[in-house]
Image (cartoon, helix red, strand yellow):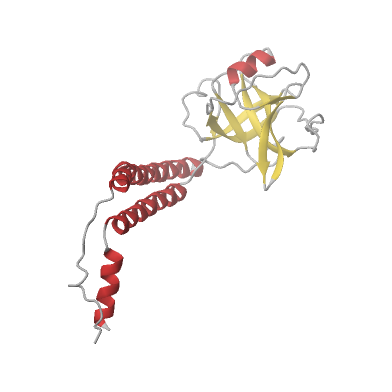
Amino acid sequence: MNRPPSCADNPLRVQLNIPIAVLTLVILPLLVGLGFWQLDRAAQKRSLEERLAHQQAEPPMALTPANMTTLPVYRRVIAEGHFDNEHTWLLDNKQRQGRVGYEVVTPFKFSQGGAVLINRGWVAGTGDRRQLPPIPTVEGEQTLFAQLVAVSEHPLLNAHSTAVDWPRVVMAIEPVIMAEQWGQSLLADRYLQLDASSAGALETTWPLMNMSAQKHTGYAVQWFAMAFALVIWFVVANTNVLVWWRARKERAL
């Protein structure tokens, strides 16, 4: 009479698959390291989010040429002066809700002297790269509410433009290069993001950071899941664990 296979008939054995073992030895530490790196980034972002939330809750501070470089980034500020409507840049490849358009950057001259770039928000493109969207002007002295932002550098994006007319399409905000095009000096390597309630504001929805703590945590979970899957693959490929497990279940029936 046939009897079901037992665990004694199929003991758990290890038969090392050298290529898979080497691959696991190389990749597993990398996956685990990436997971912990993302967790560390998530902790940093949570700390930054808390500081930014605290700054956003504080009343706006008057922005002057004297404190332009000393105020913390994302500090809410009040600026008094007027726009230079004759000179405007359009940041290319900006999308909102699937629509292609530009962010509008215009110099703003302080009443007490000096100037700063202001990102006024987003406008939709016309659908024709040769036809730029009309930009509404803002005349006279204005009191604006905005948040102070540091310029972020990108190795592939810059503010160079071969155009001679205005507005000019650029790929990034670079105050030094833009000041040369403008023909006047700017105060600092910073700019303002305009509040929606201020004069000259277009479509403004400013994210405080490009990636939240929750996204970093999600990426960490993905890396750890890949590491776990790699371990399972290693065990299955280097042992008879599946046969051993089936024999154990059949014996229990």
Would residue 158 appear left or right of 125 to someone viewing this image?
Answer: left
- Number of numbered discs visible in the structure rendering: 0
* Image point (59%, 31%), residue name: 192
Up the image or down, 85 lies above or below 38; here it is: above
Horizontal and vertical percent for residue 241? 27, 64
Q: Quadrant of the C terminus?
A: bottom left
The location of residue 127, given as percent across then percent down, is: 79, 38
Left or right position of 159 against 37: right
> Where does residue 232 sit, x and y in percent of width and height?
33, 57
Residue at (22% x, 69% y) in the render: 10
Residue name at image x 61 percent, y 26 percent: 173
The image quarter in which residue 19 lies: top left
Looking at the image, the residue that sits furthest to the left is 8
Quadrant of the rendering where the N terminus is positioned:
bottom left
Is any atom of residue 252 visible in this view? yes
For residue 244, above or below residue 17: below
Q: Nearer the viewer, residue 87 or 24?
A: 24
Is residue 106 found left or right of 60 in the rendered image? right
Q: Is residue 197 visible?
A: no
